[in-house]
Image: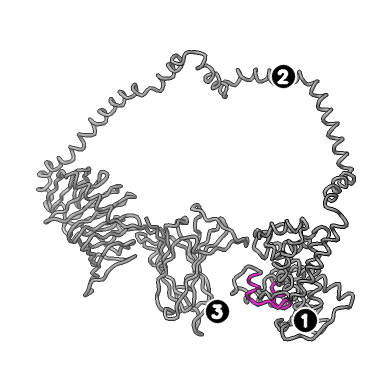
Amino acid sequence: MDERHLIDRCIRGESAAWEHLVREYGASVHDAARFTLRRVLGSAQDEDIENVYQGVLLGLCDRDAHRLKLFQSRSSFRTWVTSVTVRFSLNYIRTEKRKGSLKYLGLDASAAELPDRDLLPDDAEERERLHRALEKIPPREKLILKLFYFDGLSYKSIAEIMRIPVNSVSPLLIRAKDSLRKHAEIP
Amino acid sequence: MMCPGPEQAAAYADGRLDPADSARYLEHCSECDDCRRTLAVLSVPRESSPVPAEREARAIQALRRALDRDRDRTPRGLRRQLPAPARVQNSRVGFAIAAALLFGFVGLLLLAKQPSGRVVEPREAVVQRDPQLPVTPPRQEPVVETPPRETPPQEPAPKSPTIELPKPAPQRTNEVPRFALPADPPARDLPKPEETRPVDPPARPPAHTVVARVLTEVQITDISGSLMIHRKGAKAKERLTGVARIGDGDVLSAEKSASFQVEGRHPVVLSENSSISMAYVALEQAPWLKLHSGEAMVDSTGSARWVVTDGMIAVAVKPARARFTAARGEARLSLSTLSEPLYVQPDGGEVHAIRLGEEFQVGKSSLEVKPLDPSLTAKKNAAFDAARPRQRTVFYTSCDPVDAKREHFFVQEGTWWKNEALNSRELRDRSAMASVVPNPRYAWRETMLVRVRFLTNCKTVEIQQRVDERKYTLFRKVAVDRNGAGLWQTAELPFVVSTWQFRRDDGLNQLMVTSDDKIDSLRFVVKPADVYGDSKPYVLIDDIQVVEKD
């Protein structure tokens, strides 16, 4: 079924269309929820994944599909719903952290995908100094450092995001680190 | 910048943002953690795992309940009616606008009654302007209007005499004989010097023998066909291709038709079984063509001088935009023109004009002009066109500073930057870029190609063409095989836009290359880090040639 047609039917409130949408795009929502929770928290509990999964789908349907109507076909629906899920997950984590209800577990085997690339040192002062230095370096360099060290992305993913050749990632990273070192006054 | 939200992230991930928005969004991502994380998740490839069945069922049930709740709260029929009054109630501004419009409309109606006299005024003004400006379109209008009113034959009648061609025609016929009559005598006068020659020989018996000249090397380009050269002192012949330098002791020979360009603009075609030598006469600033056997056809477009000789007799061809042939006979040299009049001066003799359909034969002490079969001229022209080079070197530099000083060499006034670094292996300079400025600049055309010889120990050599005016660089990398490292290689890169990458100074990723874009510099870039082995990086560049093919 055509993506736009399905969404229009959902907006009209056809329950069969919603069911179809869940079966077609639910996996993307589920994956994005699980992945984001793992990336941010280091692990993802089933309960949290389900909360996000249902929260996103209900959010789309809620208030006369108010949220779904915001989809303007500027991207594919799958990308859009994944993007919405990531945002929802991040908000969910923030809210639950505030409530203190998030349970942290040790990294399970499947969560070991997050590479160990700690840019920030343990020392609070050092950490603060690095944060300040990060604010001073050019946006492009800042972004590549964050993508590599904070988000743990591979060169390939970074290249894809920044629309640069994979070969350029390493020199850019080196330059960014030099720049950071200069601004942080690290010898 | 406010956070543009997940829609922007999705659009960026799907590549649907324009370059400017993309750049802005990436800049925002460097500040906004949520957007950056969203992009990070979207970019990581994941294997989609199915949702557990119970979880999916629960989600569907929850959705159904939500839909039912919505239906209970606001029946669909009502939902359509409710928004309308709500909008009206909330928008008092709407009332104000409607009232303003109403007042405005009434006001306009009132005004429309008063200025009825004013409307007439402009009409009167237009009427007054007509006689003042007689040149403007009003003239055309009466012409268009009148034909249907009056009889059509009367109106065209005054027009026709001005356009009629028959009257000027007789004037032209009168002009032609005026030009024809004086033109004939000088043409026929020229062969007559033969009659005056008997007077000359007693005064100077060896009239047309070769005068001593200082000869230097000449450079030829765009060699096509099978052209062999027997270098002075060499044991064997070698085949010529591309670009070559030849001196008076070298003999070029062609068993079949072959051709090349001299000074990058004068095609020379050798007929079958011809052999020649070529050099350059600095004093006369002319290429020197010595016929050993056969025939050479030359296009001297650009009004260049030539010196043609068979070894005993020499003829200076005066600057003339003519295509001519030179053939060697028994103690005589024959020249004929294939296009325009050709002016020649045998060594020790006077200047003579050869016209189309004539052949100029000069011996040691004889000179005569003979009629030539027109079909033969046409045949030679056809042979010339068939064998001439199918390409033209637009720019060439041998990267040898000595060559640049030889004006007759087709080395343009290229300005080299850091060229020693690339040309001198001894310097071992780590400079990674050389640039040559072609002069004149050449425009980008898909019929062109760049050919360059290089020797390097790097894995790639990047060849760049820079357009300063529009601030972009087209570049292409040439991979160097490990076995080819340290050996001279030739790269030939056609100017096909799709095969070149580009880099805009402003970072945007769209480019329209036009034929108006002139290349300001040719650059050769190697990366010191990109070296085979652990030796110092070097690259030597030579024979940069930009060629335009027919």
Are dots 1 and 2 on a single chain?
Answer: no
- Across and down, in percent, residue B3 comes to 78, 63
Task: Look at the image and tell me whether residue A138 can be seen.
Answer: no
Q: Residue at x 88, y 74 (%)?
A: A98
Q: Is residue B14 left or right of residue A40?
A: left
The label number, if any, that marks residue A65 in the structure image: none
The answer to the question of whether label 1 and label 3 lie on touching residues, with beta carbons closer than 8 A, is no
Q: Chain of mark 1?
A: A
Colouring scheme applied when the structure was drawn: one colour
**Pointer 3 local density, CA inside 10 Å: few below 14, some 14–19, many at least 20:** few
Q: Nearer the viewer, residue B386 or B135?
A: B386
Please, what is the three-letter code of the amino acid marked with disc 3? Answer: Ala
Look at mark 2 in the image and give the residue it sits on.
Answer: B121
Q: Is residue B434 magenta?
A: no
Q: Main secondary structure of the magenta part?
A: helix
N-terminal of the two: label 3 or label 2? 2
Q: Secondary structure at mark 2?
A: helix
3D distance between C-alphas at marks 1 and 3: 41 Å
- Across and down, in percent, residue B246 comes to 28, 65
Look at mark 1 in the image and give the residue it sits on.
Answer: A43
Look at mark 3 in the image and give the residue it sits on.
Answer: B529
The mark total stands at: 3
**Region rendered in magenta:** A143-160
